[in-house]
Amino acid sequence: MSDIDKNKQIIQNFIQVVWNGRDLSALKDFWAEDCVNHAMSGTDNRGLNALLIYHDSFFDDFFSAFPDIQIEIVQQVAEGDRIATYITSQGTHSGVFYGILPTGKHISTSVIRIDRVQDGKITEHWSVSDAAGLMQQIQY
């Protein structure tokens, strides 16, 4: 297996174990100690501890609102140490999400993530999600 294929597999495993498996404790198995998460808000999470704090809060909110959400990798493209992954998520709005009471609506949204992998760990991450589309789906 080439290094590029190994790096793609790391991202696939991360999504399956941490996101679909709801195993936040496994986050440290996939990310480097000195990692940087370039959050969409413009605030970077630097270091594994900051990343864990960020994800802990986000996971609680997200999986409480969409407890049955499943993520599917649609496509991956890689070059060197960078992997671009296009994913879709589908689930049911069953809990409060950013102040919006549960609607019972089925949602579908997409994310494009770019990860840099070195020595078998994610060292840097960027993502863009269709947050506006998600919010539009759960509005009345």
Image (cartoon, rainbow, N blue to C red):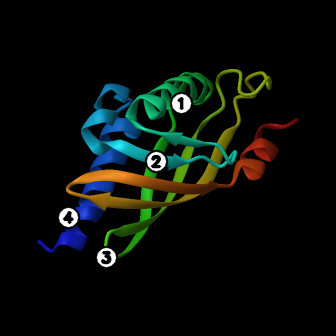
Question: What kind of residue is marked 1?
Answer: Tyr
**Marked residue nearer the N-terminal end (2 or 3):** 2
| Residue underneath mark 4 | 6
**Marked residue nearer the N-terminal end (2 or 1):** 2
Q: Are marks 1 and 4 in contact (CB under 8 Å)?
A: no
| Residue underneath mark 1 | 54
Q: Are marks 1 and 3 in contact (CB under 8 Å)?
A: no
The answer for how far apart the CA atoms under marks 2 and 4 are is 21 Å
Q: Give how far across and how far down residue 94 sits, in percent.
A: 64, 24
Question: What kind of residue is marked 3?
Answer: Gly
**Marked residue nearer the N-terminal end (1 or 4):** 4
| Residue underneath mark 2 | 36
The answer for how far apart the CA atoms under marks 2 and 1 are is 12 Å
Residue at far bottom of view: 79
Residue at far left of view: 1
Figure check: 8 above or below 109:
below
Residue at 25%, 38% in the rendered image: 29
Q: Which of the 4 image quarters holds residue 111?
A: bottom right
| Residue underneath mark 3 | 80
